[in-house]
Amino acid sequence: MDIARARPPSLDKLLESPALRELAQAHGRAGVLAAARDALDAWRGDTSQPFDNAQFEQRCRTQLESRAALNLRPVFNLTGTVLHTNLGRALLPQEAIDAVTALMGQAGNLEYDLASGARGDRDDHIEGLLRELTGAEAATVVNNNAAAVLLVLAALAEKKEVIVSRGELIEIGGAFRIPDIMRRANAKLVEVGTTNRTHLRDFEAAIGAKTALVMKVHASNYAIDGFVASAPLAELAALCKGKGVPMAEDLGSGSLIEMTRWGLPAEPTPQQSIAAGVNVVTFSGDKLLGGPQAGLIVGDKDLLAKIKKNPLKRALRLDKMTIAALEAVLKLYRDPDRLAQRLPTLRLLTRPQAEIQALAERVMAAVAKALGEGAVVQVLPCKSQIGSGSLPVDRLPSACIAIGAPPGAKRAGSFPDRLAAALRALPRPVIGRVVEGQLRLDLRCLDGETQEAAFIEQLARLTPLRG
Ligand SMILES: *Cc1c(COP(=O)(O)O)cnc(C)c1O
């Protein structure tokens, strides 16, 4: 048969078929038309095959379904980093998810005062809680902590000097650098001290008529050790008070509760800073606090009034979804005894090693079965990280599934990367880490029976690795 002459029916005819009509119901006529054209082009590009109607319809369906699937979707975070910025940081508690869901399809009192019937302020849903939890006089919230720092500097130090220790001129991932943010806020950075040592007298000598702010920045993602010194917080705050210059502190993560309570390493809290006399404190909503992405600003009433009045506040304001989630998360902090069960971030960080180990042993069999002869699978102890610049040097004992190439395998060198790619191609992508020639899946964040079952179930779809 002359294959080139096995012509398909006309496009109009094809679109009239029951299968394509059904697809048009689900995906719209325009989408089906585009998919049909693509499928015809694909057939024309491969003249070795006669036109096949079933294959044509399947091509259309596959293209339409893959286009309809959401690009942003859940993954399994088995990287061992609990607060993974690239994977969306903190997981919200059910209370916050419910609050967001309830509000999204309906009108709400976002900026409306129900008592008076007059216009309200969106900060009102959060401010009282933040005052209660941190001991500060006033509070506001913006899009993230980088925005909070920018706003504080723009509102309090425009065209004036801000004194920062050389040991705290940090860069956070994603191109957030203290000197750059200063420039953008139109504030002049005055560096004092040295990389490893900055004393109270360095600040004292630098404070002058042009000083708008003394700023302390939490080193977050690095630690220096050895011959180091920094000015104690309370002494620095007292010096600033004596000189009549406000003091700001960027805590970065900032936990609202003592982490040592759960055997975790100590992390400074905003309430400690406020008690020490710091005038404005900024911290993230989605790091150790375990809430949505947000930047929280707490401190003195007069300074917060200036901050709220700055036009940048309007540009950086939170949306209602975030406010709903943040209010629900902050309310959980009123009952610290139950926090570790209710707040996913804390639950994951405090998960006992023995529990993760037992989970790893259960899941290992399923992984070994899915990979068959093609891999060597074992359970190994490992260390998880908190992530997002929180407590950078401390590690949490955990357990992982370590997967390596079988002895004598061809292309063993590329094995972990090929396996990692296959796991990322699953319906719910699995993200691990390649370490020492193995792919390692830290199971700390595989939380609950439903997730465990979902993880195991989709392993059956793992495409075999070609050696
Ligand atoms: C993480 C961090 C920031 C940025 O916070 P985002 O909420 O990610 O914008 C700023 N400063 C410090 C010290 C941090 O650790």
Image (tube, rainbow, N blue to C red):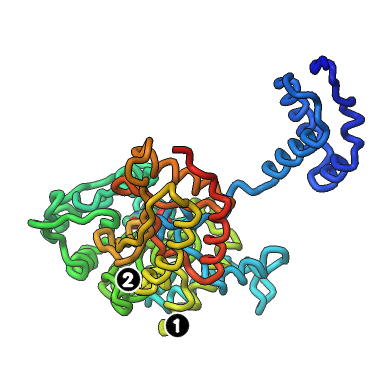
Which comes sooner in the sequence, label 1 or label 2? 2
Residue, x 59% and y 68% (percent of image)?
97
Circle 2: residue type:
Thr
* Closer-to-camera residue (395/317): 395
Q: Nearer the viewer, residue 74 or 410?
A: 410
Picture mark count? 2
User: Mark 1 — residue?
Assistant: 338
Report the residue at 71% width, 20% height from top: 45
Q: Secondary structure at mark 2?
A: loop
Q: Is residue 339 above or below residue 301?
A: below
Task: Determine whether, in the image, residue 297 is placed left or right of residue 45.
Answer: left
Q: Quadrant of residue 215?
A: bottom left
Q: Amino acid at mark 1?
A: Arg
Q: Name the residue rendered at 29%, 76% in the picture.
A: 263
Nearest the viewer among 283 and 361 is 361
Q: Residue at x 49, y 51 (%)?
A: 312
- Residue on which the image places disc 2: 269
Residue 312 appears left or right of 390: right
Residue 112 drawn above or below residue 85: below
Could you tell whether 211 is left or right of 257 in the image? left
Residue 434: x and y in percent read 35, 47
**Relative to 443, residue 330 above or below:** below
Residue depth check, mark 1 versus mark 2: number of the one nearer the observer? 1
Q: Give x and y (percent) for residue 8.
A: 85, 25
